[in-house]
């Protein structure tokens, strides 16, 4: 190869290198813009999803608050009904028979006699004595 051919090849390589460098920088700028645009889109999507999650969380809290309020109202209504029935029983019922209703509404929720103490069996399991199937009632009823 002659010196002119070698010089032409070197100049061609330098020109290809310079063109590649500027083309790469141009593509890098386009890529940065694309990455910035994608970041903005993802941030918007994230903000939207976070707002949806917050709205859903608020709905769940509102649902449970309303459920708790309704449950309290229901318990109050049952207590009023129990008090009414108990008062009617005391006024209208026969006084000579055993009392079927406990003295307070909560006793029905306490389950078997609250004062009964468990005793240990040989297996280590507690055994409840003198407990009736229903609060205030007897096994013979």
Image (cartoon, rainbow, N blue to C red):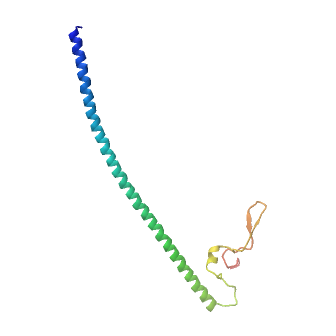
Q: Please tell me how many numbered marks the rendered image carries.
A: 0
In the image: residue 13, left or right of residue 107: left
In the image: residue 4, left or right of residue 71: left
Q: Is residue 41 above or below residue 17?
A: below
Q: Residue furthest top?
A: 2
Rendering coords of residue 79 (x, y %): 57, 80
Q: Is residue 117 above or below residue 136?
A: above
In the image: residue 20, left or right of residue 111: left
Return the residue nearer the eye: 99 or 21. Answer: 21
In the image: residue 126, left or right of residue 26: right
Identify the image quadrant of the N terminus: top left
Return the residue nearer the eye: 7 or 111. Answer: 7
Identify the image quadrant of the C terminus: bottom right
Rendering coords of residue 39 (x, y %): 34, 45
**The image quarter in which residue 113 lies:** bottom right
Return the residue nearer the eye: 28 or 38. Answer: 28
Q: Is residue 120 above or below residue 73?
A: above
Rendering coords of residue 29 (x, y %): 28, 37
**The image quarter in which residue 19 lies:** top left
Q: Is residue 2 above or below residue 83?
A: above
Please tell me which residue is depicted at 29% across the width and 41% down the height of the picture: 34
**The image quarter in which residue 92 lies:** bottom right
Return the residue nearer the eye: 1 or 96. Answer: 1
Please tell me which residue is depicted at 39% across the width and 55% down the height of the picture: 50
Rendering coords of residue 84 (x, y %): 57, 86
């Amino acid at each position: 190869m002659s010196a002119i051919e070698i010089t032409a090849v070197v100049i061609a390589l330098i020109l290809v290198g310079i063109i590649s460098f500027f083309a790469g920088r141009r593509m890098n700028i386009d890529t940065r813009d694309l990455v910035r645009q994608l970041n903005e889109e993802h941030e918007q999507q994230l903000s939207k999803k976070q707002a949806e999650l917050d709205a859903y969380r608020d709905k769940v809290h509102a649902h449970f608050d309303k459920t708790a309020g309704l449950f309290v109202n229901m318990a109050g209504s049952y207590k009023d009904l129990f008090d009414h029935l108990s008062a009617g029983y005391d006024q209208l019922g026969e006084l000579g028979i055993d009392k079927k209703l406990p003295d307070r509404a909560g006793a029905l929720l306490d389950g078997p006699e609250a004062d009964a103490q468990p005793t240990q069996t040989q297996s280590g399991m507690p055994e409840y004595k003198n407990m009736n199937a229903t609060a205030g009632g007897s096994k013979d009823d």
